[in-house]
Amino acid sequence: MSATEIASAIGVSISTFYRHFPVR
């Protein structure tokens, strides 16, 4: 697994997390 693929997966996870739990 390349670093780019890992970064993309992490980015999607964070985006989904904040979509369910908005933090202001």
Image (tube, rainbow, N blue to C red):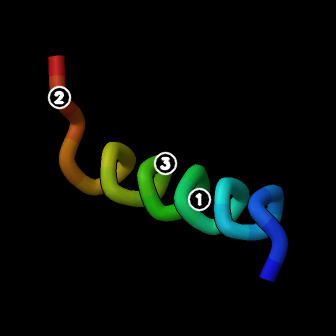
Residue drawn 23% across the image and 36% down it: 22
Examine the rendered structure and indicate whether residue 2 appears above or below residue 15.
below
Residue drawn 16% across the image and 16% down it: 24
For the residues labelled 2 and 3, say whether their Cβ atoms are less than 8 Å apart.
no
Chain-order first, disc 2 or disc 1:
1
Taking the view exactly as shown, the residue that stands out farthest to the bottom is 1
Q: In this figure, which residue is indicated by the disc labeled 1?
A: 12
**Residue 18 in the image: x percent, y percent?**
33, 44
Which quarter of the figure has residue 9? bottom right
Q: Amino acid at mark 1?
A: Val
For the residues labelled 1 and 3, say whether their Cβ atoms are less than 8 Å apart.
yes
Q: Is residue 17 left or right of residue 22?
A: right
Q: Is residue 22 left or right of residue 16?
A: left
Find residue 4 and name its label: none
Q: Amino acid at mark 2?
A: Val
Q: Secondary structure at mark 3?
A: helix
Find residue 23 and name its label: 2
Q: Is residue 12 left or right of residue 21?
A: right
Rounded to the nearest angstrom, the CA distance separating label 2 from label 1 is 16 Å
Q: In this figure, which residue is indicated by the disc labeled 3?
A: 15
Residue drawn 79% across the image and 83% down it: 1
